[in-house]
Image (spheres, helix red, strand yellow):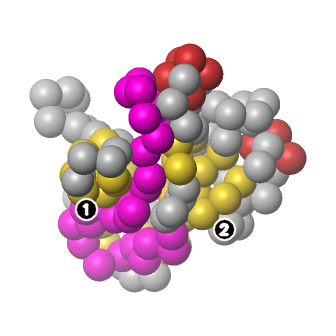
Amino acid sequence: MRNTGDSEVTILQVKPDLDGEGLTFLGAHVAGLDRQVGQVQELRGYPPNDVRLGDVTTVEGLVLTAGEESAERGYELLRGFEVTGHGRTAVRGIDVTYDAGEGVETVRLLSTLAVCAPKMGPECPQEYPPGLGE
């Protein structure tokens, strides 16, 4: 997540758009500007505990500072999910609700994920953001 504006942004809520019953959302954290790695696809355990991520904090209430480093490097959103059922479950996007000082707004991050449990098969197609795909 990047803050390209001139004022601080406070994150109020992060909520996935889930389609299916096989995943439980465990929460969201962020890796800050001091992280060594970026775009981590998978970590074992939640909340994440990897020294390469730097300071990891819960996302609700986080204040994204304004400035060049925040705008260019950004904060990495880390989402925790647990497989709790069978079948296909898709994450269609992540809704981030925030306040930038001019009222509360929500933006959708087009980050998709499809999980099939107990195993992948022909009834479990890939998941793509709108406009992308096969």
* Front residue of 115 and 57: 57
**Residue 24 found in image quarter:** bottom left
Task: Give the percent coordinates (x, y) of residue 126.
Answer: 29, 44
What crowding class fits label 1: few (fewer than 14 Cα within 10 Å), some (14-19), or many (20 or more)? few
Task: Give the percent coordinates (x, y) of residue 71.
Answer: 50, 23
Q: Is residue 22 magenta?
A: yes
Above-or-below relation of 92 to 20: above
Residue at the left extreme, as displayed: 131
Determine the secondary structure under disc 2. loop
**Residue 19 found in image quarter:** bottom left
Query: Which numbered dot is residue 131?
Result: none
Amino acid type shown at disc 2: Tyr
Q: Which residues are magenta?
A: 1-28
Task: Give the percent coordinates (x, y) of residue 27.
Answer: 51, 69
Q: In the shown orientation, is residue 115 left or right of residue 74?
A: left
Above-or-below relation of 70 to 103: above
Above-or-below relation of 5 to 81: above
At a point 34% along the width and 45% down the height, the residue shown is 100
What is the CA distance from the residue labelled 1 to the residue labelled 2?
Answer: 19 Å
**Mark 2 highlights which residue?**
46
Mark 1 vs mark 2: which is more N-terminal? 1
**Mark 1 highlights which residue?**
17
Q: In the shown orientation, is residue 72 left or right of residue 44?
A: left
Residue at the right extreme, as displayed: 51
* Front residue of 124 and 4: 4
At a point 44% along the width and 53% down the height, the residue shown is 10
Is residue 78 among the parts visible in the rendering? Answer: no
At a point 55% along the width and 37% down the height, the residue shown is 65
Task: Give the percent coordinates (x, y) of residue 101.
Answer: 33, 48
Exactly how many numbered labels are in the figure?
A: 2
Determine the secondary structure under disc 1. strand
Amino acid type shown at disc 1: Asp
